[in-house]
Image: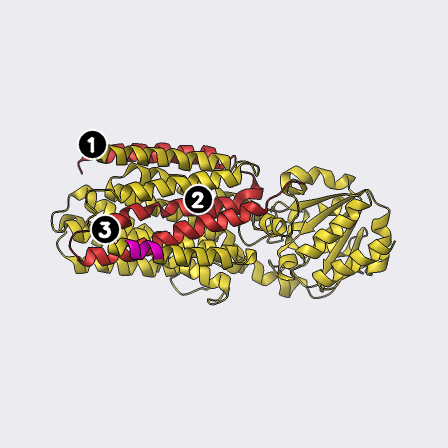
Chain colours: A yellow, B red
Amino acid sequence: MELVIQLTYLVASVFFIYGLKMLGSPKTARKGNMYSALGMLMAIIVTLFDKHIINYEWIIIGLIAGSAIGSTFALRVKMTGMPQMVGLLNGLGGGASVLVALSEYYKIVPEIPVTTGTTIIISILIGSVTFTGSLIAFGKLQGIVTGKVVKYPLQHPINALLLLVVIAIGVYIVINPGNADILLSVVGVALVLGVLLVLPIGGADMPVAISLLNSYSGLAAASTGFVLQNNMLIIAGALVGAAGIILTLIMCRAMNRSLMNVVLGGWASAGAEGPAAESAGPKGDVKSVDAEELAMILDSVSSVIIVPGYGMAVAQAQHAVRELANTLEKKGVKVRYAIHPVAGRMPGHMNVLLAEAQVPYDELIALEDINDDFPNTDVVIVIGANDVVNPAARNDKSSPIYGMPILNADYAKTVVINKRSLNVGYAGIDNELFFYPNTLMYFGDAKDAMSKLNSELKEL
Amino acid sequence: MDGQSFLMLVYIFVLAIFVGFELITKVPPTLHTPLMSGSNAISGITIVGALLSAGLEEFTISTILGLVAVIFAMINVVGGYLVTDRMLKMFKKK
């Protein structure tokens, strides 16, 4: 039986790898996810035949309770709430790793070899930080915990000290494994460390934090694999760890930040001075249009690029935007969407929000693939986005977003910006694009404004 | 576990990281959110360890920890795969 179990674990690992490979294209992605789920199912079933499992009552209770809660979450969550959902799931994965490591300790204490003891400590450290860190991230995204950058005195020395404490007690336990209370103190300190590491990170940086915690949850699973000497757990955990790191780096690049800068919570100090100093007065006149005028302009164009921002999702305007796009397409206009990597609240979030509104994925174009097309585009419609089209990122060395890759919306023949007011964006800085000669401001709530524009356009 | 078998585990870990990097860099930005939730579900593989703890012969503190771990990991697995499927279902070509 042992051989069958190990071989099934190998097959499951292959299914995970193959499933991730199929996620490389929207055509095969759904099937890939199912392969991955199938691998998981095989792993769970075959584990139930392990000779160490004698009693099934607790297992059945746990499996049923977990499945019920998990499926309720998954079916109820709104697409705008996806970052919180992923944050919460990250945390639970980390929590499970801590519990398994602790359970393993109690199972084999007091005879614990040095290697096993070390892996248990590492597993507890990564798992605990992932658990509380993710809960804080969840709280920030949900609005339970403040989304502001929280600063407290001696922030970095305290965190470094806590990490040293964990390592010191960890080493002690590896040498003298008998005392369970001391091990629990490691758990406690590591849990506090998770809170303190994520608390300083501001709301705007949550896409990075969530990605990083995703990576941690993978590493936590891998560390459990080390504790149990299980290759499948190590492979699966390593895959997730790699995925999280890649997404983290993509997000950092898109925000023009270094990972250290995000983790240490430096954004606020740069952004906070901005609005007070710069928004003293308007830099010129803005031209504004109403729905009727705008419809007339759009009636005679051949290409439109829509730049959606999170403001569009907040206003629940996705469907109105898609209906406008449909009307334009019926008139023979080529419509595409330019998606900035940080347009949503997590990597790829905007694509999901638009897919939900039945926008076909082949119209969603990533920044690097569409940026050269702006000069040949008649009209760009910017909806609920601001910083991602701010030319200051290109021209103004003093701007906090200088160097951040932006969508070159200003190169288009006409730029239409839909906003409720001239207020600053997430980064808290003015946008000179509003005052450009080729820019038209179309004020109003995104949802109302788009449906009004759509009905005007239909009448023409 | 002796040093030799520990080293084998490290081998596997390092190689799997490289496989992960190769696979994930090929995922288009459109699919980054489902990628995250889907890979998140994979990290629920800790369920295997949780089951081994929850099914012990005698009822001890290890069993209780195992039970809670089974619940946590199962929420992660079921929630992760279902929500990923829900998202991927929406991605349609024109």
Disc 3 crowd rating (10 Å Cα; few below 14, some 14-19, many 20+) is: many
Chain of the residue under the numbered disc 3 shown in the image: B
Q: Nearer the viewer, residue A159 or B36?
A: B36
Q: Nearer the viewer, residue B70 or B22?
A: B70
Residue named by callout 1? B4
What percent of the width, then of the height, locates residue A216? Answer: 38, 48
Q: Are marks 2 and 3 in contact (CB under 8 Å)?
A: no
Q: Is residue A277 above or below residue A259?
A: below
Q: Nearer the viewer, residue A329 or A152?
A: A329
Discs 2 and 1 share one subunit: yes
The residue located at (40%, 43%) in the rendering is A241
Indicate the amino acid at tag 3.
Ser
Residue A128 visible within the image = no
Q: Of helix, strand and loop, which one carries label 1?
A: helix
What percent of the width, then of the height, locates residue A182? Answer: 19, 59
The residue stretch that appears in magenta: A60-64
Q: Of helix, strand and loop, which one carries label 3?
A: helix
